[in-house]
């Protein structure tokens, strides 16, 4: 018999000793690698599924918004055709242009959210990331009569995977909206903390708050207190678990403060990076890379 590598694997409960030869050990190593690969792929798929479910939450309000935009375009086009004065035509063109620009902002937000960049990270302007997401949720908040405020201090940049961080923001904003009654206020804060070298984004609501017995579980996978609604949709309990994974993989932190009956604030912190340098075009300065 040739050389035999011995490997002892103890099965903790029964205290069995397993003896393996080198071939068996190789097989086990290969199997282990395959399982790790499968796990990575499954995590990626779960992330995509969660992303689709959070944007699905907004699908109806975004479709309505596009309908409103089209109605504006059609009505002002008709008005411009009927009234041949310069004044009326200018007004019609202005309205059509504004409606078109609004539609383009929404599709830009959607594309930036939907774009998958694998794990690629680059320096991003936090304000731009937040703006692209707010364009998507604006209508949904309006439908639920939630006021949205944005409070910006400084102009932080962080090295992030834009689409993943936007998924985090969308999850936090949807949670916040679901916790509030009509008349609530959502505040998104951005702070450049140069002392701690952190970019800070907070999502604060004036909703129900989180009970003490629930609080320790909210970042656990599949933990949800949301019951199934009329369309058969409840919470999957994956939103915050995903937020935590994404932020920690970015070497950041996520923290929650809450008060029953007053509301909840989630704060994420990401390491600051320098603003990307500007390259000089023929006669204008444009950023080397754009968020999105
Ligand atoms: N802003 C908030 N206010 C009050 N409770 C919250 C807030 N955010 C999260 N929670 C609580 O944390 C739980 C877990 O949140 P998470 O986003 O992980 O799952 P979910 O929202 O229930 O489901 P999903 O995100 O899949 O729709 C929620 O069910 C809710 O009880
Ligand atoms: Mg959620």
Image: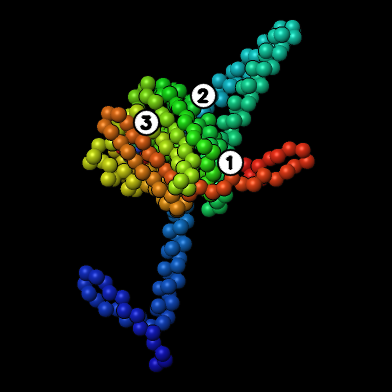
Q: Is 287 located above or below residue 18 in the figure? A: above
Give the mark, 3 or 1, whose residue is nearer the N terminus: 3
Q: Which residue is mark 2?
A: 64
Task: Tell me which colouring the rendered structure shows.
Answer: rainbow
180 sits to left or right of 26:
left
Residue 194 percent location from the top left of the image: 48, 44
Asked if disc 2 is less than 8 Å from ligand 1, the answer is no
* Mark 3 and mark 1: Cα distance apart in space: 26 Å
Q: At 49% across and 35% down in the image, what residue appears? A: 153
List the single residue furthest toward the bottom: 1
Among the 4 quarters of the image, the one containing residue 147: top left
Q: At 39% across and 93% down in the image, what residue appears? A: 1
Asked if disc 3 is less than 8 Å from ligand 1, the answer is yes
Q: Which residue is mark 3?
A: 205
Give the mark, 3 or 2, whose residue is nearer the N terminus: 2
* Mark 1 and mark 2: Cα distance apart in space: 24 Å
Q: Please tell me whether mark 2 sits on a helix, a strand or a loop.
A: helix
Crowd tier of the residue under label 3, counting other residues whose Cα lies within 10 Å: few below 14, some 14–19, many 20 or above: many
Q: Please tell me whether mark 3 sits on a helix, a strand or a loop.
A: strand
Rendering quadrant holding ligand 1: top left
Q: At 45% across and 27% down in the image, what residue appears? A: 149
Q: Which residue is mark 1?
A: 292
174 sits to left or right of 64:
left
- Kindly report which numbered mark, 3 or 2, lies closer to the viewer in this rendering: 3
Crowd tier of the residue under label 1, counting other residues whose Cα lies within 10 Å: few below 14, some 14–19, many 20 or above: many
Q: Please tell me whether mark 1 sits on a helix, a strand or a loop.
A: loop
- Kindly report which numbered mark, 1 or 2, lies closer to the viewer in this rendering: 1
Residue 99 percent location from the top left of the image: 62, 22
Is residue 133 visible to the viewer in this orientation of the structure? no
Q: At 64% across and 47% down in the image, what residue appears? A: 277
């Amino acid at each position: 018999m040739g050389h035999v590598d011995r490997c002892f694997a103890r099965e903790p409960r029964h205290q069995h000793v397993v003896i393996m030869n080198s071939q068996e050990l190789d097989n086990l190593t290969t199997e282990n690698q395959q399982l790790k690969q499968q796990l990575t792929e499954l995590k990626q798929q779960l992330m995509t599924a969660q992303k689709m479910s959070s944007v699905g939450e907004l699908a109806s309000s975004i479709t309505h918004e596009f309908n409103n935009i089209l109605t504006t375009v059609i009505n002002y086009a008709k008005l411009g055709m009927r009234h041949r004065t310069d004044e009326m035509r200018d007004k019609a063109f202005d309205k059509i242009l504004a409606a078109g620009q609004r539609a383009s902002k929404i599709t830009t937000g959607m594309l930036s959210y939907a774009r998958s960049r694998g794990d690629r990270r680059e320096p991003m302007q936090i304000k731009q990331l937040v703006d692209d997401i707010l364009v998507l949720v604006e209508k949904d908040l309006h439908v639920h009569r939630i006021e949205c405020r944005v409070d910006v201090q400084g102009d932080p940049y962080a090295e992030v995977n834009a689409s993943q961080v936007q998924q985090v923001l969308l999850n936090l904003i949807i949670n916040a909206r679901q916790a509030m009654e009509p008349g609530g206020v959502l505040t998104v804060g951005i702070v450049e903390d140069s002392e701690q070298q952190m970019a800070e984004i907070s999502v604060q609501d004036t909703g129900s708050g989180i009970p003490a017995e629930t609080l320790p579980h909210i970042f656990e996978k599949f933990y949800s207190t949301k019951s199934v609604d009329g369309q058969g949709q409840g919470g999957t309990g994956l939103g915050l678990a995903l937020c935590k994974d994404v932020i920690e993989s970015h070497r950041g932190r996520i923290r929650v403060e809450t008060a029953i009956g007053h509301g909840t604030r989630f704060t994420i912190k990401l390491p600051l990076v320098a603003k990307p340098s500007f390259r000089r075009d023929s006669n204008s300065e444009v950023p080397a890379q754009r968020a999105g």
